[in-house]
Amino acid sequence: MKKSVIVIGAGVAGLASACRLQHAGYEVTLYEKESLPGGKMHRIQQDGYQFDLGPTIVMMPELYREVFQVCGVDPDDYIPMQRLDPMYSVYFGDQPEDHYEISSDLIELTKTLESFGDEDAQGFLEYLQEIYKRFLVAKEHFLQKPFRKPSDFYNYSMLRQGLKLKTFDNADTFISKYIQNERLKQMISFQTLYIGVSPYSGPSLYTMIPMIEFLYGVWFIKGGMYTMAQSLERLFKELGGTVHYNSSVDEIVIQNGQAKGIRLNGEVIPADFVMCNADFPYAMKNLVKEPKAKGKYTDKKIDNMKYSCSCFLMYLGMDKKYDDVPNAHNFIFNEELERNLNDIFTGKRLDNASFYVYIGSKLDPSLAPEGKDGLYILVPVSDKSCSQYEWNDETIQHYRGYILDALEKVKGFENVKQEIVSESYMTPPDFEQRFNAYNGATFGLQPTLSQSNHMRPQSKATHCENLYFTGSSTHPGAGVPIVLLSARIATEELLHDDKGILFHTR
């Protein structure tokens, strides 16, 4: 008889874990509080326009493909991809010289780098070489393995590898060793925001994010990022798995130090194992109610941990095509990135923010009515734990007004206010309410040094058997490729405990 696994949450890590476990021979049932799969990889549908709710940029496509390959199917039948070149546009102002097209093609990239001067072009290549060395160490020794016990990290071999990561300087300090031009520095360092941490405080290792873009490219999945969520759900069902939507789990049932199932609407549903994809801080405070099973993650500990930034998102249906805007991905900077980010992480309301504009319908016209485009606009903002202001209609209108004023200065968007025919928003309280993102922190726990690797919540519960965690607040961290790694680690941990399988990542 097959052993049973309950997976809580149909976020991308929950879906990937469910697929892997179902393929491995378990009877897997997935419970999701929303009506659709994907978690923050959700979809917004309004007035004929379709938007990815959260993540939009596909990096490290091999990790997206891996789940399907492990389950014995061709990824191209599920998530057809195309490489984007240029990858994105960057704007610092309204003049032609303020606009940069960023390519992962070495020839085109070199032209852009040399426009900042030969010394900075040389420095950029030196930065790439140095961070690539660290990336290989991180990939081999840290990102793909669990840390069950202190000795998994605190041993001679691991500490020797850890020193190679040189994590004690922040991203901005590290980049400044190689590059002097402020614009070029910002174009590299801002990408730590992909995982919700400031380059002025986040470890320098996270400058591997732009390196991954430059060396491996940026990709697009036909239909948008939501296609990944739909395809994982489809694969899971094809493998024989069961999904229950609109099913908000009340509790992880724990008896005698073992997870025994879940409580849903007052009913106990038994299982041999529980895989929790709910945000780890939320799960520890609300789903794990047995004090001993929490271990060190008491309510007080959870409240005192550091959280990533949140996001304010606008989904705008427009009455035209933006043919004069060359790329789908666009970053608009205000030249005061450090002040902007300091304000975010100290809880101030922003009056002069940098932001991101994505036009998915430029890559797949089916995402908008014929002859029209949809604009997805994202502004990093404070999470609720540090925010000094409330989210209400006045706050939304404040951000909306500033963003549209700034966007009108960018070529191609000069009349953007008059071209809006449909709009909706996501705010930090929405992330908290809809996706149980603790404090509305879009990316979960901040990846600070004290909340990374062995010091980050691990896949295997420390004080409860048969309970596992996956997702952005667990090791190895946030970002779609990384949470796909967390799903791999979590399922391998379960298989190790149940079947004694030793994986190469150990």
Image (tube, grey):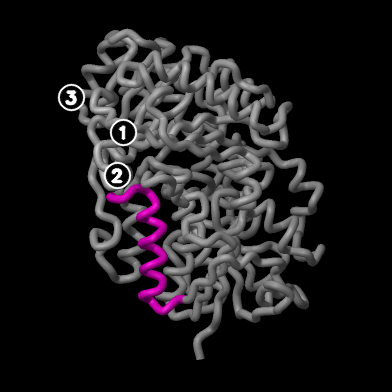
- Residue sitting at x 42%, y 47%: 139
Q: 3 or 343, which is in the foreground?
A: 343
Q: Which of the marked residues, 3 or 2, is nearer the chain's N terminus? A: 3
Q: Is residue 318 magenta?
A: no
Q: Amino acid at mark 1?
A: Ala
Q: Which residue is mark 1?
A: 328
Q: Amino acid at mark 3?
A: Ile
Boundaries of the magenta span? 222-241
Alpha carbon separation for disc pair 2 and 1: 10 Å
Element at label 2: strand
Look at the numbered discs 2 and 1 and tell me whether their residues touch, using CB distance below 8 Å. yes
Q: Is residue 229 magenta?
A: yes
- Residue sitting at x 47%, y 52%: 42
238 to the left or right of 423:
left
Q: Amino acid at mark 2?
A: Phe
Alpha carbon separation for disc pair 3 and 1: 21 Å
- Residue sitting at x 36%, y 10%: 94
Q: Which residue is mark 3?
A: 107
Q: Is residue 233 visible?
A: yes
**Position above or below: 161 against 180:** below
Residue depth check, mark 3 versus mark 2: number of the one nearer the observer: 2
Q: Which residue is mark 2?
A: 220
Element at label 1: loop
Q: Which of the marked residues, 3 or 1, is nearer the chain's N terminus? A: 3
412 to the left or right of 145:
left
Q: Residues within 10 Å of mark 2 (few under 14, many from 20)?
A: many
- Residue sitting at x 34%, y 29%: 129
* Residue 276 picture location, percent across and down: 60, 63
